[in-house]
Amino acid sequence: MPEQRGAPTEIEIHVKPYVRKYVLARLGDPQRVATDDSSRRLYTDLERELRGRRLVAVVQDYDPHHGPRTKVRLLVEPRPNQQPEVSYYHHRYVTGMLTKAFLREMYGWVDWYRHRLGMSTGQALQMFRRHYDITEDDHSLETARRMYSHHLRGRSRARSAVNRS
């Protein structure tokens, strides 16, 4: 017998404005989730991180004329006797998972733009940010450049450790 679930409830997850734009672009359109592998993987990872709550939808409330916003609204169906809202402690894990997914995608695309298309790091970051409509108000380009530089340093340290062994 299938497990009974409650009615969908809206919960809010606090994230950085650039992560919010990424999540809404990836998960706000059910058609994209149905046809795009990486969006489906993000949807599944988010649902897993919600610990038993079934993710029904990500509320698409993007308005380009509204300033940076820091909440992603989710419709979830909790299990019987389960609170719809995630705990404050666990909320950080959900936020962290979404942020890491954004960074993985950013690093992958910037690497590709740089190595395959010969762009500079700045050009590659601007191209990626333009894809998700990320502005300077959402996330500073200089901060993104430092994050990418840190990513490269960590990757080269890992490579040199493998070469030493």
Image: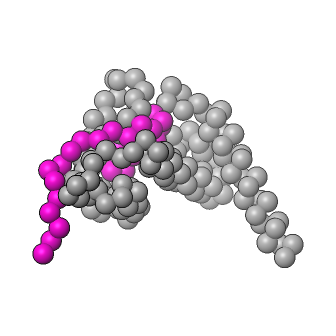
Q: Tell me where the magenta segment starts and ends, as one range.
A: 1-27
**Along the line of sight, which residue is nearer the eye, 38 or 77?**
77
Q: Answer with the quarter of the image where residue 74 lies.
A: top left
Left or right: 105, with 2 as reference point = right
**Residue 44 screen position, x and y as percent:** 36, 62
Q: How many marks?
A: 0
Quick check: is 3 in the magenta stretch?
yes
Residue projecting furthest to the right? 164
**Residue 21 appears anywhere in the view:** no
Q: Is residue 130 left or right of residue 48?
A: right
21 horizontally vs 79: left or right: right
Q: Where 146 falls versus 46 (above or below)? A: above
Q: Which residue is located at x 15 percent, y 71 percent?
A: 2
Question: Could you tell me residue 72's position as x and y percent?
Answer: 35, 39
Q: Residue at x 59, y 30 (%)?
A: 140
Front residue of this view, candidates 90 and 111: 90
Residue 34 in the image: above or below residue 73: below
Q: Per the image, is 92 magenta?
A: no
**Which residue lies at the image location 43% right of the left edge and 41% below the top edge?**
88
Q: The N terminus is located in which quarter?
A: bottom left
In the picture provided, is 140 more to the left or to the right than 157? left
Figure check: 11 above or below 93: above
Q: How is the image coloured?
A: one colour
Residue closest to the far front = 81
User: Picture coordinates of residue 61 (x, y %)?
Assistant: 27, 35
Give the image location of residue 129, x and y in percent.
51, 40
Which quarter of the rendered picture does the C terminus lie within? bottom right
Q: Is residue 26 above or below residue 72?
A: below
Is residue 90 among the parts visible in the rendering?
yes
